[in-house]
Image (cartoon, helix red, strand yellow):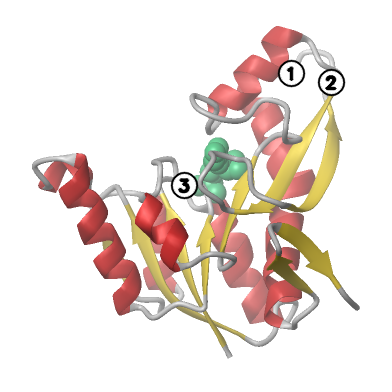
Amino acid sequence: MLRVVVLASGGGTNLQAVIDGVAAGDITGVMLAGLISNNKTVKSLERARLAGIPAVSVSPKDYEDREAFHRALLAKVDEFEPDLIVLAGFLVAIPEEMVRRYEGRIINIHPSLIPSFCGVGYYGLKVHEKVLERGVKVTGATVHFVTQGMDEGPIISQRAVYIEEGDTPEILQRRVMEQAEWILLPRAIDDIANGRVRMEDGRCKRSE
Ligand code: GAR
């Protein structure tokens, strides 16, 4: 059983897709070991607790500086002894030390087709605002391994989603979640848990 720890900041719909995937047997070989949020009062904590997953918050507000927050976050992650860390809408930068310690064992979901609309300042609804501002006709979502550069790690999977007339950032966000994110993330976790996907020599390797 692959021990999976999920990090989430907000609503936790991607977390829910993973919980549902495990419950439905679409994700196999996985044990959801814990949920960590950087916020104290968010839906993702509630979703995890309802599913019987140990859920804790580690908030930057409780620490005097970023370094202390990073130490606390990493200590909490270590406590759960994860084989895989899933950033499912975790909207704060993770400590460099975490990336070093868990190299090849951290994945992230991003709501655009990387390398478009990603990097510093591109997270959550902001991504969709910028997509609409730019007027592109196709967007989507990406699951990738996490390396030191923000949103720069090897890509595991992507799915395209069309922009439609009258889209608002909120409408587009929902469509990207429904048509891409909630499908890609559970599948990527299942692929990793069952040995079909791994990071090797800085690239994503796939074998059936
Ligand atoms: C999702 O759209 C996810 O892709 C995005 O935040 C949202 C979280 O929603 N993540 C990023 O922007 C990371 N750079 P959720 O809490 O309902 O899963």
Residue underneath mark 1: 167
Task: Find ligand 1 in the image and state its quadrant.
Answer: top right
Residue 71: % across, % down: 22, 58
Q: Nearer the viewer, residue 188 or 46?
A: 188
Residue underneath mark 3: 11
Secondary structure state at the residue bearing disc 3: loop
Tell me which residue sits at (54%, 40%) in the image: 149
Secondary structure state at the residue bearing disc 1: loop
Q: Is residue 141 left or right of residue 63?
A: right
First reached walking from the N terminus: tag 1 or tag 3: 3
Is the CB atom of the residue marked by disc 1 within 8 angstroms of ligand 1's nearest atom?
A: no
Residue neighbourhood size for the residue with mark 2, other residues' Cα within 10 Å, grouped as few (<14), some (14–19), many (≥20): few
Whether 25 is drawn above or below 177: the answer is below
Image quadrant in which you'd find residue 28: bottom right
Disc 1 + disc 2, Cβ < 8 Å: yes
Residue 29: % across, % down: 66, 87
Disc 2 + disc 3, Cβ < 8 Å: no
In the displayed image of the protein, which residue is found farthest to the bottom? 1
Residue underneath mark 2: 164
Q: Amino acid at mark 1?
A: Asp
Residue neighbourhood size for the residue with mark 1, other residues' Cα within 10 Å, grouped as few (<14), some (14–19), many (≥20): few
